[in-house]
Image (cartoon, rainbow, N blue to C red):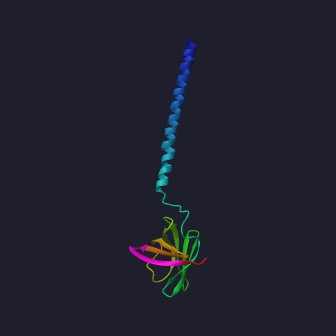
Amino acid sequence: MTRTNSLKSAIFLLLISLNYHTSFSQDLAQSIHLKPLSKMYSISKNIVVKNAVLEDGMYTYKFRKDDILVEIKNGIYYEYHPKNEFIKAKIDWISEYEYKLIIIDIEKRGVPFKIGDQLTAEIVKIKNNEYFYTSRFNKKTGKGSFKKIK
């Protein structure tokens, strides 16, 4: 009888001990591993937009009398101007219709942009292969359109 009582007591103490270690391990795992991951997620500003309205390809728009060629390729926006001038920007999609251009290289006289400047634009209307947009830079708003050619 005493052996069964001591065996029951030993098993009972063993179960309490295992339960304590398991809950302690879970608390430790949550405090060490889960919280830093959630902080990293909240710090991250990268947004993945799967159905962005502008696809990789070639576009064109009129600027004064010139046709300006625009190429979007692998997240980079290129604008080719006459006289070997260009603007190169990283395109970050904010939503399906809105994006931010961050100037990463520029060789263009007479524009208010410099490397690091950010311009936001929103596609407000699509008619056939023409995309109408509203853009914002330095508290100024502009409107325009460009056509997809490839």
Q: Is residue 125 above or below residue 10?
A: below
Residue farthest toward the left in the current orientation of the protein:
139
Look at the image and tell me in which quarter the N terminus lies: top right
Q: Where in the figure is residue 51, as x and y percent of width and height?
A: 55, 64
What residue lies at 50% left-to-right and 40% top-to-bottom?
Answer: 28
Instruction: Return the residue nearer the eye: 144 or 99.
Output: 144
Residue 148's image quarter?
A: bottom right
On the image, the x and y values in percent for residue 125 come to: 49, 73
Label count reads 0
138 part of magenta stretch: yes
Q: Is residue 142 above or below residue 43?
A: below
* Extreme residue in the right direction: 150
Q: Residue at x 51, y 50 (%)?
A: 37
Q: Name the residue furthest bottom.
A: 65
Q: Residue at image x 54%, y 69%?
A: 53
Q: Is residue 116 visible?
A: no
Tell me the chief SS of the magenta region. Answer: strand
Viewer can see residue 90: yes
Residue 89: where, in percent of width, then height? 52, 72
Reply yes or no: does residue 39 show up in magenta. Answer: no
Q: Residue furthest top?
A: 1
User: Could you tell me residue 145's position as x and y percent?
Assistant: 49, 78
Task: Please tell me whether residue 101 is drawn above or below residue 41 in the rendered image.
Answer: below
Quarter in which the C terminus is drawn? bottom right
Query: Over which residues does the magenta segment extend?
Result: 136-146
